[in-house]
Amino acid sequence: MQLQSTRLGTRDAARSIDMFQAHAYDRLLEAYQPFGGVMSGDELVARLTGWVEQPISHVAHWIVEDCLIHFSPRGATCIPCFQFNGCAIRPLLQRAISELRGPFDAFEVAQWFVTPNALAAWRAPAELVLAADPEVVAMARTDRYLASGN
């Protein structure tokens, strides 16, 4: 009896990866629902119109400089709503993101904020941001250290 190979073809492997990524993004979108959901980049631009000059440039700067949480399922930019107080980004959020930069990519940062954390008595870091609890910055620093060693 001869064993047959069950290797996936390149097309099948790519399809499996796409399905896995789509499922991960769907779960992340669901995880943000208790925190106000997400908005598109265009929705954020519309929200900033009248509040800042050149809102498109503002949003682009925030995304490029990792000043806010963002992720892009299927090519659409999603921006969680909880991170804003009116039209301003919550300061604790920016400090926590700056601690996570480096070892975490944009998707992992987005996951981090909605994943219950032992350092916060199993609350999600997004809850601490909303409560203006500065402990979220220390949690981010600890998790950065655990992920990178520095």
Image: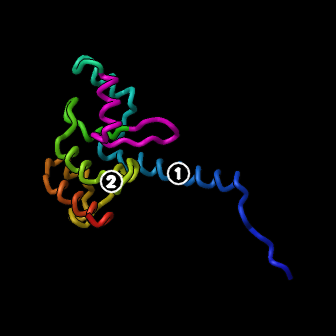
- C-alpha distance separating marks 2 and 1: 22 Å
Q: Nearer the viewer, residue 122 or 6?
A: 6
In the rendered structure, which segment of residues is drawn in magenta?
55-78
Q: Quadrant of residue 87?
A: top left
**In the image, residue 73 above or below residue 54:** below
Residue at 71% from the left image edge and 61% from the top image edge: 8
Q: Position of residue 69 (x, y in %)?
A: 32, 43
Tag 2 residue: 102
Q: Element type at marker 1?
A: helix
Residue at 32% from the left image edge and 64% from the top image edge: 147
Q: Residues within 10 Å of mark 2 (few under 14, many from 20)?
A: few
Disc 2 versus disc 1: nearer the observer: 2
Residue 139 located left or right of residue 20: left
Total numbered circles: 2
Residue 114 seen in render: no
Residue at 40% from the left image edge and 38% from the top image edge: 78
Q: Earlier in the sequence, mark 2 or mark 1?
A: 1
Quadrant location of the C terminus in the rendered image: bottom left
Outermost residue on the right side: it is 1
Residue 25 located left or right of residue 117: right
**In the image, residue 136 above or below residue 51:** below
Any magenta on residue 56? yes
Q: Element type at marker 2?
A: loop
Q: Position of residue 137 (x, y in %)?
A: 18, 54
Residue 142 seen in render: yes
Question: What's the amino acid at mark 2?
Answer: Gly
Q: Nearer the viewer, residue 30 or 47?
A: 47
* Circles 2 and 1: CB atoms closer than 8 Å: no
Q: Quadrant of residue 122?
A: bottom left
Question: What's the amino acid at mark 1?
Answer: Gln
Q: Position of residue 17 (x, y in %)?
A: 59, 54
Tag 1 residue: 21
